[in-house]
Amino acid sequence: MTATASTVRATGQYRRLQHESRAAAADPVELVTMLYDELEIALGVLGSMVRQGQRISATEPAHRARAILIGLDAGLDHDAGGDVAAALSRVYRSMRRKLDDAVLQNDDAALADLLEGLLTVSAAWRQLR
């Protein structure tokens, strides 16, 4: 069964509403988890695009991934988080540089490495629960 444009739009709208309602009820740890989930999706889409022979610079998933990394870094509470916040800031900035390089080079292997690093950070974060 092939999805029609209206089905794709409706699915996207439903997904956005789901995320908005989840975000409204989430605590700070859950909000970061949601951002990690969204970043994982964006990196996966970028890798898929590269494997299909598409250029990924100036695409919505590339912009979204970068914006999420900037938001994660900007949202750190350095006063309360101390050394952990400083370490996470270094991680997010490194990931952003790697993302920029991967997007510029259209490099699937670099995107896979970045995704692997994200999954490691995300797994550690989820253990806070």
Image (tube, helix red, strand yellow):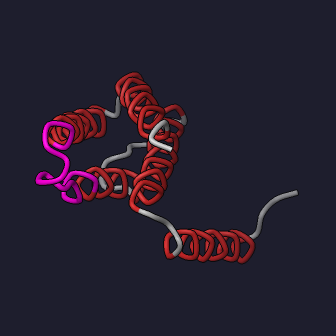
Q: Which residue lies at the image location 27% right of the left edge and 32% below the top edge?
A: 105
Q: Which residue lies at the image location 26% right of the left edge and 36% below the top edge?
A: 95
Q: Which quadrant holds residue 29? A: bottom left
- In front here: 19 or 109? 19
Q: Which quadrant holds residue 125? A: top left
Residue 48 location in percent, x, y? Answer: 54, 38
- In front here: 94 or 109? 94
Q: Which quadrant holds residue 76? A: bottom left
Residue 55 location in percent, x, y? Answer: 38, 43
For the stretch drawn in magenta, the main secondary structure is helix
* Residue 80: in magenta span: yes
- In front here: 83 or 112? 83
Q: Is residue 1 left or right of residue 97?
A: right
Residue 85 location in percent, x, y? Answer: 19, 44
Residue 46 vs 59, above or below: the answer is: above
Q: Which residue lies at the image location 23% right of the left edge and 41% below the top edge?
A: 92
* Residue 70: in magenta span: no
Residue 42 vs 31, above or below: the answer is: above
Figure label count: 0
Q: Which residue lies at the image location 51% right of the left edge and 44% below the top edge?
A: 129
Residue 15 vs 6, above or below: the answer is: above
Q: Is residue 62 left or right of residue 36?
A: left
For the N terminus, the quadrant is bottom right
Residue 37 location in percent, x, y? Answer: 50, 49
Q: Which residues are magenta?
A: 72-85
